[in-house]
Image (spheres, helix red, strand yellow):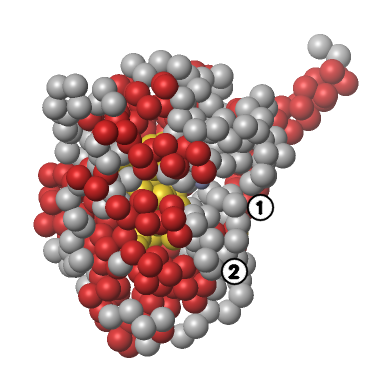
Amino acid sequence: MRRWLLGILIVALLAALAFFTLAPGMLERSMNKVDGKPLPTISAHAKALHQTLTIVDLHSDSLLWSRDFLDRAGRGHMDLPRLEDGHVALQVLASTTKSPKGQNYDANGGDTDNITALVIAQLQPVRTWNSLLERSLWHAEKLHRAVAASNGQLRAVAASADIDALLAARAGKAVPVGAMLSIEGLHGIGDDVGKLDKLYAAGFRMAGLTHFFDNDLAGSMHGLKKGGLTPLGRQVVQAMEAKGMIVDLAHCSKACVADILQIARRPVVSSHGGVQATCRVNRNLDDAQIRGLAATGGLIGIGYWDAAVCDTSPASIARAMKHVKDLVGIGHVALGSDYDGATTVRFDTSQLVQVTQALIDAGFSDDEIRAAMGGNAIRVLKAGLVPQTPPPGALSDPEDVPHSALSEPGKTP
Ligand SMILES: [Zn+2]
């Protein structure tokens, strides 16, 4: 071989090696930021109370990124050691599979995708390169591998009994930490409801119908048409409820939210977002939607990033949570961080005591804080994970049976 050709080959190989080693970390560092602005001091009361809480966060995208969840990373917002520092009992980990180029909150088509490049740069298995379903199955595999390698410190949660066992094993300690899988947009199943079974079998127990673009099931709040549930979407909601999968309203269009609230028979959640009353961003819930969601017995998970609460301060998070409490009661308030979801936040999960402090400062009682930080989520997840066979014919005309038939949520868990 000529010397110059060998030289070019070596340079190309080194460049490829550097790219595949460094690019994923650099990309994550640029997308999942902590803004570094000052944080309030934590009182002795907040510290002590925080250690007694059962904390549940309804949404994080950590599985999207290429790093070992068991190791403390110098980037992003979450890993097992930081969840332990933050005293988190149960983390819902989402699978995000497709994100349009130029993604924005107003209007996106589904023709392009940024995640494909990420998947290749991260050297994920080839089967995940052009299959959205395989991307989710890979995320599940990543979690299950981490659980297996964690020496009992990380546990997968996929049933109501798993939650009981998790809480019994913790008994006030920082470990084990539970993790439950969810899906951010069910476009991975295409138009095949049967593929929901594959996701269920892999451990997914919560799902939003759409993410940033309209799909075969429903319109997205950020899609082009922003329509409601399609007949297939209706079928999927009913199939999810029957299986014991929790329906997530996050990212659904207004029409989609209205349609789901009309046919829901089990508590639904908005896993991550904010409220219009404190932050007028299109994806945030208005008061009528909050009331409708609360009527199902469900949860509103408040996020920590600027588009959810219009600021990154802990006080803004508490303000949104207080609005939900004042409007529909403490029983519907929850955490929905959107950590590692291409968000910029003020603090990572290791400093979650900041939310406890902010809730104290906003006038929440200790019992209200206990409910908001996770007690409510434990109630809804435990109930929602139990499979339920609907009575014969009950689903033929969903509009006949409103969700008011559902049981009242407990005030304090
Ligand atoms: Zn999201």
Please tell me which residue lies in front, 283 or 71. 283
Q: Tell whether circle 1 marks a residue whose Cβ is less than 8 angstroms from ligand 1.
A: no
Image disc number at residue 30: 1
Location of residue 203 in the rendering, given as x and y in whole percent from the top left corner: 29, 33
In the current view of this chain or complex, which residue is farthest to the front? 400
Q: Image quadrant of residue 80?
A: bottom left
Q: Residues within 10 Å of mark 2 (few under 14, many from 20)?
A: some
Vertical placement of residue 272 versus 236, above or below: below
Location of residue 87 in the rendering, given as x and y in whole percent from the top left corner: 31, 65
Location of residue 333 in the rendering, given as x and y in whole percent from the top left corner: 34, 63
> At label 2, which amino acid type do we have?
Asp
Is residue 117 shown to the viewer in this render? Answer: no
> At label 1, which amino acid type do we have?
Ser
| Residue 247 falls left or right of residue 277 | left
Location of residue 125 in the rendering, given as x and y in whole percent from the top left corner: 49, 23
Vertical placement of residue 402 versus 84, above or below: above
Residue at position x 20%, y 45% in the image = 405
| Residue 97 falls left or right of residue 391 | right
Is residue 264 shown to the viewer in this render? Answer: yes
Vertical placement of residue 306 versus 52, above or below: above
Residue at position x 49%, y 61% in the image = 275
Residue at position x 42%, y 78% in the image = 358
In the current view of this chain or complex, which residue is farthest to the top? 1
Q: Image quadrant of residue 140?
A: top left
**1 vs 2, front mark:** 2
> Label 2 near label 1: C-beta < 8 Å?
no
Q: Residues within 10 Å of mark 1 (few under 14, many from 20)?
A: some
Please tell me which residue lies in front, 172 or 294. 294
SS category of the residue bearing label 2: loop
Vertical placement of residue 51 versus 129, above or below: below
Residue identified by numbered label 2: 311
**Mark 1 and mark 2: Cα distance apart in space:** 19 Å
